[in-house]
Image: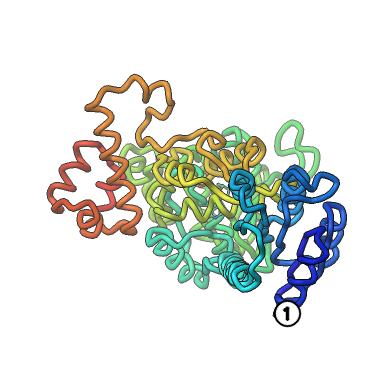
Amino acid sequence: MGKLLVVDDDKGIQKQLKWGLSDYDIVFAEDRSSAIAQLRRFEPEVVTLDLGLPPDPANASEGLATLTEILSLAPNTKVIVLTGNTDKENALKSVELGAYDFYQKPVDVDTLNTIIQRAFNLVSLESENRRLSKVSASMGSIIGNSPAILAATKRAEKIAKTEITTLLLGESGTGKEVFARSIHNHSERVNKPFVAINCASIPENLLESELFGYEKGAFTGAAKTTKGKIETAQGGTLFLDEIGDMPLPLQAKMLRFLQERVIERVGGREEINVDIRVICATHRDLQKMSADETFREDLFYRVSELIINIPPLRERGNDVLLLAKSFLDSYNEQYNKSLKGFSDEAKQALLSHQWPGNIRELQNKLKSAVVMADTPFITPDDLGIFSLPGESESVEEFQSLNLREVREIAESKAIRQAYNQAEQNISRTAELLGVTRPTLYALIDKYHLDDIRASN
Ligand SMILES: Nc1ncnc2c1ncn2[C@@H]1O[C@H](COP(=O)(O)OP(=O)(O)OP(=O)(O)O)[C@@H](O)[C@H]1O
C-alpha cells in the first residue's frame, strides 16, 4: 500500500480525505513541524500539502517553506499542492520549487485521487529507473547505452576473460582507466591487485625504479631493497597509462618483461618471474610514433594484441545525459543538496557541447553546478555552457554574430541534435532533417562537424 501524508490544518478536509482515500496508508499533519516529523518517521512517497498553514493560514508562505523543506529532506517525494481557487500564482511557484502538481480547492476526492494515483505510478517508475540505471551497463561502472560505448564495452567484456595484452585508445578523460579497472574486475584476477601507473607523470629518471623496483645501494638514496609497481601487481593486473610517453631506453626493458615475464630490479642480478596481466593506454598515435621511431615497433605490436577504441563523449549521444544524472546524484549526496534535474535548455547545452575534456570535464562542470545552483533544476548558466555548438560559447560572442553566422550555428546545432536523436544513424538523421544524405554530408563538411564525418 502506498504511503500518503496529508498536510492540512482543516479537520473537515482531513476527515473527508481519510474516508475518500482509503486505498492508501494515510497519515496527517497540521503544520510545518508536524509535517516534517511525519515525513521523517513515515517516509511517505506522496504528500498533499495545503499552502495555507498556521501560523499564517491566510498566506502561502508557510506552505511554500514546508514544501521546500520536504523536498530538501526527501527529494524523490511527490508533493501535490492544494491552493485556494484564485491562487494560481502560488500554485505555479510551487511547481517551480519542485512540487509534482497542484490542485485547486474545493476538494473533489475522486479528482484528487486520480492525481495521487498518477504520482504513485511515477514514484514506482522512477525507483525502477534508478534501480535499472545502477545495473544497466554490463561492465559495472561504465555508464552509457550509446552504440559507440556498447561496442567498446562488449569488446572489453570478451577480452576480460582472456589474458590478451590490451591497448586502450582514447582522448584524455574518456574513461580509459575506468575500462582497465572493469576488465580487471571481470577477469579471473579480480581478487588480486590492480596497479596503475601513469608513465607521463613520473620523471624519466625515476620511472625505471618505480616500475621495476631497486636493490639496496643501487643508487644514492637507495637505503633498502624496494619492490616496483610490476612486482606489487603480482598475480593481478598492471595498468600502464600513457605508454606512449615511456622513454625509449626503458621501452627495451619493458619489451623483455612483456615477452619473457621476468624482471630485474635496478641494481639487481636476480631474475624475478612475474605473472601479470598488462593493459596499456594512450591518447597518442603509437603507429605514427613507431614510424617516426619514437616508439619501438616491436613494443607496439606486443602491447596492442587487441585494441579497444574508447569513444570521446561528443560521440556518445544521450550518454552525456545519463552520465550527468549519475554525477548529479552523487554530488547531491556529497554536498547535501537536493537538485532535481536539468532544465530543457541545460539538456540541450549538454548535448551540443563538444566536451574537449570528455567525462572529466563533465564531472567538473557538474560538481560546480551542484554547488552553485539555487533553483531545483540546473540551468546552462550553472553549468557554464550554452547550447550553441562550436568554440564560441560565450553570450557576448553570440550577441556580436551576424545573420549568416546565426544561421550556421542554428543549422549545425540542428544537425547535431538530429544525429543524437537518430542514435548516430546518418540516414535517419537526414530523414529527421528532411534532407537527402548527400545534402547532409555537404552540410557536415561545410560546418566542419568532423566528429560526425569521422564516424561515417
Ligand atoms: N563510463 C563512465 N561512467 C562513469 N564515470 C566515468 C566513465 N568513464 C569515465 N568516468 C569518470 O571520468 C573521469 C575520467 O576517467 P579516466 O581517468 O578513466 O579517463 P582516462 O581516459 O584514463 O583519462 P587520462 O587519459 O587523462 O588519464 C574519472 O573520474 C572516471 O571515474
Q: What amino acid is found at the position of numbered circle 1 in the picture?
A: Ser
| Image position, residue 365 (x, y; %) | 56, 39
Give the quadrant of residue 13.
bottom right
Residue at (19, 42) in percent of width and height: 443
Closer-to-camera residue (246/192)? 192
Circle 1 — which element? loop
Closer-to-camera residue (124/324)? 124
Residue at (48, 43) in percent of width and height: 358
Can residue 92 be spotted in the picture? yes
| Image position, residue 413 (x, y; %) | 32, 41
Per the image, the residue denoted by label 1 is 22
| Image position, residue 129 (x, y; %) | 57, 67
Closer-to-camera residue (305/386)? 386
Q: Is residue 90 left or right of residue 39?
A: left
Give the quadrant of residue 16.
bottom right
Q: Is residue 1 left or right of residue 134?
A: right
| Image position, residue 345 (x, y; %) | 46, 42
Can residue 334 be spotted in the picture? no
In the rendered view of the protein, which quadrant contains the N terminus?
bottom right
Residue at (48, 50) in percent of width and height: 281
